[in-house]
Image (spheres, grey):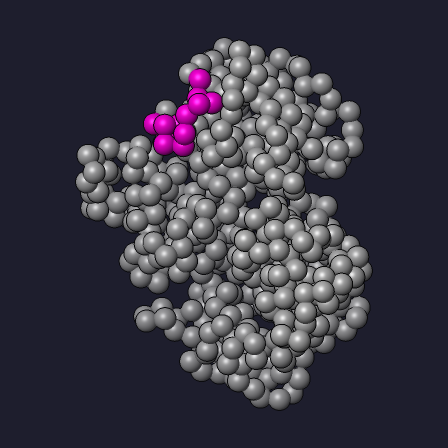
Amino acid sequence: MLRLTGITKTFGSLTANDSIDLEIGAGEVHGLVGENGAGKSTLVKILYGSLQADGGTVQWQGETIDITSPAAARNLGIGMVFQHFSLFEALTVAENIALALPKSFGLSRVREELTALSAKYGLPLEPETRIADLSAGERQRVEIIRVLMQEPKLIVMDEPTSVLTPQEADQLFVVLRQLVAEGRSVLYISHKLDEVQRLCNSATILRHGWVVARCLPSEHSKAALAQMMVGEAVAQVAASNFDPSDAAPALTAQDVTLPAQSAFGVALDQISFSVFPGQIAGIAGNGQSELFDVLSGELALTASDDANRLSVYDVGIEHLGIAARRKLGMAFVCEERLGHGAAPDFALTENVTLSRGRSDDTLVHRGFVFSAVARSIKDRVCDVFDVRKGSKNPPARALSGGNLQKFVVGREMDWNPKIIIINQPSWGVDAGAASHLRQALVDHARAGAACVVISQDLDEIFEIADTIAVISRGRLSPMVPKNDTTREEIGLLMANVGSALHDNTVESRDVA
């Protein structure tokens, strides 16, 4: 189907792709894996026509071609689902899909075909829903359906399960197998090595812009694949071993109730929990984004004497905004790193100032921005968290997804907050970087901080959390010690099956 030979691409002094060869057969799922900054995104952008190679050739079904634009790639039969969503939030699902199709497609035809494809592949979507009202998982469906409506022969998928629940990921795999059975091919980029083993017929592994291995993923362990990616054995995360004590809770939520913010949002219903110094509380399920917004101060609460109360070390914070909560020692890492966690066109130093300027007098004082301090913070974060970049102070959008994630997490942890609320901490990062980020959270908790880790990745939650709860249909199950539950039980709760999502009146100290 596709043969890339000697593909080379440089950006100034950085060689992102160095003489890369890659072949994909018809009806094959081919994995493309590598650490952050290995050159995966650059390579697929060349394949999709978003970038032009400096050297090498592309053969498509035996014919040497030049792919000069994404439109040219789509005309050939190459579709791409990007890691970062490329959707207009103010437009509807149907309108977003129509923008990627020939003008001969009217909106009525788009609505009909997307409804049919949604039903065929089990990816439900409402054509008239506005993108701004969709969850991350639903937006991923829009991206996939938009590509399928272009009738591609080869589909490039860049970290497609990063924001999906386990059930949604399973459904995606069903869809991909169905597509392969129809004779299409898939180039699958993922840092989740168990997915690569489970799904891919073959794989190409990149490191620092080079091809370092080609293999059959099913014949190698996850540890072996990870070592091929990073060039050394990936360290196992050392558990935090939280030991309950008589210390006061660092963060307490009491009967937090909030109506759905949109027709497709999730209402929060009597959410109660406590997190103690030194503890990592893992939360999975549906309604995570709303819970994060409440804890961070992005959604306001109307508190009463016995409901909608949030406190940090017995100080009520439900009425405080984000900056005021930061001054009390809280840090926040949101799910969507580009656009929400970082301003895409602002330099890294400017993004440091944006997030920390109002709560750090050494950075901004009486209206003056101390640029040298911002540079020092940026340099320290990039060094400690191994953020790889093509220049000293690039805009956020110039970083690969995994490197931007490391920067955003590192920026929040750099000032040693007392409490950190983090949503999807290792989304889109390689095995080595994920291990580094998770260990940093564990070490932070060991130093006395309280951590709330919101994640769809059950492996991640079971690796680092001390206690686990599930939010489903706006209600939170009691937190239970990690060793007292299983992935299967948590999965049932995420699907709202089981007995734990009931009257959540257990004393918070007992369940934490």
Pick whichever, 118 or 159, lies toward us: 118
Q: Residue furthest bottom?
A: 63
- x%, y% of residue 423? 52, 39
Span of residues in magenta = 316-327
**Toward which corner of the image does residue 215 lie, by quadrant?**
bottom right
**Magenta stretch encompasses residue 317:** yes
Location of the C terminus (image quadrant): top right
Location of the N terminus (image quadrant): bottom right
Is residue 80 something one can see in this rendering?
no
> At 56% from the left edge and 86% from the top edge, which residue is drawn?
65
- x%, y% of residue 233? 51, 51
- x%, y% of residue 386? 39, 51
Pick whichever, 126 or 157, lies toward us: 126
Pick whichever, 86 or 458, lies toward us: 86
Relative vertical location of residue 278 with respect to residue 247 in this rendering, above or below: below
> At 75% from the left edge and 65% from the top edge, which residue is drawn?
113
> At 75% from the left edge and 33% from the top edge, which residue is drawn?
496
Q: In the image, is 199 to the left or to the right of 330? A: right
Relative vertical location of residue 214 with respect to residue 377 in this rendering, above or below: below
Is residue 440 something one can see in this rendering?
yes
Relative vertical location of residue 17 with respect to residue 217 in this rendering, above or below: below
- x%, y% of residue 211? 52, 70
For the image, the number of numbered tags is 0
**Toward which corner of the image does residue 491 lie, by quadrant?**
top right
> At 33% from the left edge and 34% from the top edge, which residue is drawn?
415
